[in-house]
Image: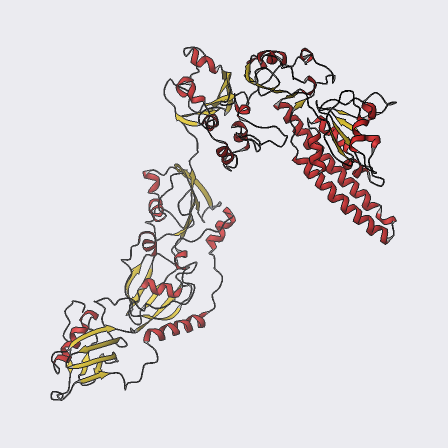
Amino acid sequence: MFGQDAPAAESTVGAPTAPPQKVRITNADRPERPQGAAASAAQRNQESAAGASPRAPEVVSEFQKFLSDSTGQILPVFGAGFFESAQSPFSPIGGGPLPADQPLGPGDELLIRGTGTIDIDYRATIDRSGTISIPTVGTVVLAGVRAGSAESVIRAAVARLYKGVNVNVTFGQLRSTTVYVVGQAKRPGTYTVSSLSTLVTALFASGGPNANGSMRRVQVKRGGRVVAELDLYAFIAKGDKSGDIKLQDADTIVIPPAGGFVALVGKVNAPAIYEIKGNGDTIESLLDLAGGLPVVADPRRAFLERIDQNRNQPRSVEQFALNGEGLKRSLKNGDVLNITSITPDFSNAVVLRGNVDQAVRVPFKSNMRVSDLIPSREYLITRSSIKRQNNAVTTSEEVRELRSDERLTEQDRERMGLGRGASLGEGERTANGEERTIASRIGGLIDEINWDYAVVERINRADLSVSLIPFNLGKVFTNPQGADNIALQPGDTVTVFSHEDVAVPMDKRRVFVRVEGEVQVPGVYQMSAGETLQSLLARAGGPTGNAYLFGTAFYREQVRKEQQVNLEKAAVRLESQLRSQQAKGIANVSALSAADAAAAASQRQVELQVAEETIRRFRQLKPTGRIAFGLEPKEKSFARLPQIKLANGDRLVVPARPEFVHVFGAVNVEASPLWRANSRVKDYLRIAGVTADADVENVFVIRLDGTVVTNGSTGWLSMGLGAMEVMPGDSIVIPEKFDKETAWTKFTKGTREWAQIFANFGLGAAAIKTLRD
């Protein structure tokens, strides 16, 4: 079966004549073995482990404690983790194939099957005399026979009595072997293992060496002499099992104390404590076991800390390079080798960053100048600019997908015209009500570069000071031989700025503005620095006959940003008022009866919920950046517009005269009746019909130009607001009365105060409706 020649084997058989009928040989009449030898071994190992001691917490050596005091961490012992997988009593080798050269002995079990003139199905175990006995065949000696030859020996024994029998032999349970583990083992004692076990597998059974045990000189003693010595480091680090041998019965595994320890720390592949085998251990051999050095280690600087007990100051440190001589240095017990990392500094590089295609680090070349780093203006087109250019051909649906792309920052979205309310399609509006169309994206395809100022940062390595060398970026391209094309040095960093990074004078900024509505040629226009609204209207062909000057709206991005900051400050102030009002209410509870206190607490809770909801809605409002011109309602000359110098992104909207007036609040029917010339506020209140709780004394009007008019602001106190003439597009708001309310509820529910706030933020009647609803 194994293809190997069998050694000579004795066979003792009886001499019966040929059987008159077919014989069947089985174990039917033989008592079944309660357990195999190896199974018994597992049980005995469990008993041995249980009898020794329960598993204790991991013990650290004195050297580990010493290093912990120095470094603040407990370094592992190299190789100790190899045995951590043996968390339960070791299980002997069971179902693996039996090597052909394995000698058989007492306790090994064979399964014999034969077919032909006789049928054999027999399980036999080699007894102490080294034989097995097969019924009707006789005794077969197998002690010392190789496993690969067992089948041919048994076949020969059967053939002496029976012809034409095909014999097949396999193996069952194998005999157990008793070995002894002594010395510096984690669990010394007697172990019963499989006859196939080796030194390494037995070490697993005992848990390996303890904190003070040697991994470099594990010995096997047989008959009073050392027959093998295993260096576990060679096995663990390189897979060298040349020192691993098969164990025999009564072998003794000796784990001597370690000959000494050294530590390897810093930038190494495997920081740990390593056992040294003798004076022949060098830094090179230690690093070989540790897997060498990582690429970030600096071989120019290594520090060796050494202990010399004969000196007054036992500890010393020396520095050297890990060159040929340094690697050959011998290590001693207690040494600590610290290898530093390389400094992540580029000695031959220059950096380009800022408003460029991509920030890069390039190798320095002799006589290198700025023009070598930036060969052409195309290198200054940023990736976000390219995104906007690519996005110029996207559809409305694609814009919605881009807008929801989590990989884009808010700045990316703004630059690409993809604000949270932006769309290329009709009907979608931002939170402030502005309809975002493709016109809002014109003029922003590329980031404007500051051609007048760029800078080189240079580090003086002598004193580590930094100097700035500014230059005119535009002249680098127009006059490459000029002084602005600075000669670079290794380590220089060149930064290019946009108009957003460093604000440039207005005269140097690009100005794209939009004019819409009732002008002859609405569109987006590129204006020169210093031009005004009148210049824009002239460029657009002037107003149409339907233009309504009083309702003209002018929007500026910088104003919107400032309004947003102020709106947030207002929200914080409202929250502060809420906390203060709640604190006052709680302080007054002590003077109330229990029933009144409960009612007051309930009222405060309702007020708190209303106030918090109001603040939440308030934070959702978005300022528009609208600038109120303060024109007279009946002004008709566009020449009266203020002389405002235009800025990039400005937007002028000239509406047609509205046909309606809006009335809402405490009225019977909120409506938008037709505007009638010379009509007064009281006329529209009569049309809408005020409710019983209407606060008619505090009615106010939000005008189309964004201003708010109240009783105190009309200048006609004797006449009252009711007599004021209503202009097209005005919104008349009637607040409700509140008889019993706190200062907080007066503020949050008093719509007139809100209207004044909204007017300051460029918001109008729509914002009030949003907050109220």
Residue 671 sits in quarter: top right
Of 463 and 681, the residue lying toward us = 681
Residue 97: image location, x then y, percent: 26, 66
Residue 583: image location, x then y, percent: 79, 43
Residue 654: image location, x then y, percent: 64, 19
Relative to residue 746, is residue 74 depicted above or below? Answer: below
Is 118 on the left-hand or right-hand side of 415?
left
For the N terminus, the image quarter is: bottom left
Residue 114 sits in quarter: bottom left
Of 147 and 172, the residue lying toward us = 172
Residue 372 sits in quarter: top left
Is 706 on the left-hand or right-hand side of 452?
right
For the C terminus, the image quarter is: top right
Q: Is residue 645 visible?
A: yes
Q: Is residue 348 visible?
A: no
Residue at 80% in and 26% down? 681
Relative to residue 51, is residue 648 depicted above or below? Answer: above
Residue at 30% in and 54% down? 239
